[in-house]
Image (spheres, helix red, strand yellow):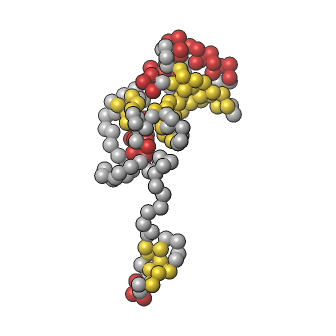
Amino acid sequence: MPDATGLELLARELREAHAGAVVDTLHFRDRATVSVASQQIRPALQFLRGKGFAFLASVHGVDYYPQEPRLGVLYELLDMQALDRITIKLRVPVDAPAVPSVTPDWPTADHQEREIYDMFGVVFEGHPDLRRILMPEDYEGHPQRRDFPLGGEPVLFTFNDAQGTDYTAHGEEERT
């Protein structure tokens, strides 16, 4: 990972190449993170690719509830030659969760962006096939958001239905 000084030098170069791209930097527990403006994600990642971070290891979503902007997208980039890793982070509000898709530049982001869309509701503009990947198409809501309701209907197991006894998912016996 770039050390704190290396991170600041890299962020300065990114600021000079793309004005307004860098929002903040953080070097914590030997992890380098650059926060970028959401609309600047593609140029920022392209710049870092030119600096050797040519492998997009993962893209994942985060919910910072109750903070605003609430939803986040994190991109983990690797430099396979220098054995460096850097995290690029952006945040978007719930009422306008739009981020440019990086799939045209990084095909490996395809299914990962779809999963973030499905689980968190972040819309990746320009994605070639943005639709739900884990939940049914008609499912309402986004299950990985922190305000998503927990619980629901208990699952009934009827392995001894002939005796008239059902067992819920918690092992509680119910007489019918």
- Please provide percent x and percent y for residue 81: 59, 24
- Please provide percent x and percent y for residue 161: 40, 83
Q: Residue furthest bottom?
A: 163
Closer to the camera in the image, 97 or 30: 97
- Please provide percent x and percent y for residue 118: 39, 45
- Please provide percent x and percent y for residue 5: 68, 19
Can residue 75 be seen at all in this image of the molecule? no
Locate residue 95: give its quadrant: top left
Quarter of the image where the C terminus is located: bottom left
Locate residue 111: give its quadrant: top left
Q: Residue at x 48, y 37 (%)?
A: 71
Quarter of the image where the N terminus is located: top right
49 with respect to 5 (left or right)? left
Q: Residue at x 37, y 47 (%)?
A: 133
Can residue 29 be seen at all in this image of the molecule? yes
Q: Residue at x 49, y 34 (%)?
A: 69
63 with respect to 137 (left or right)? right
Q: Residue at x 53, y 75 (%)?
A: 171
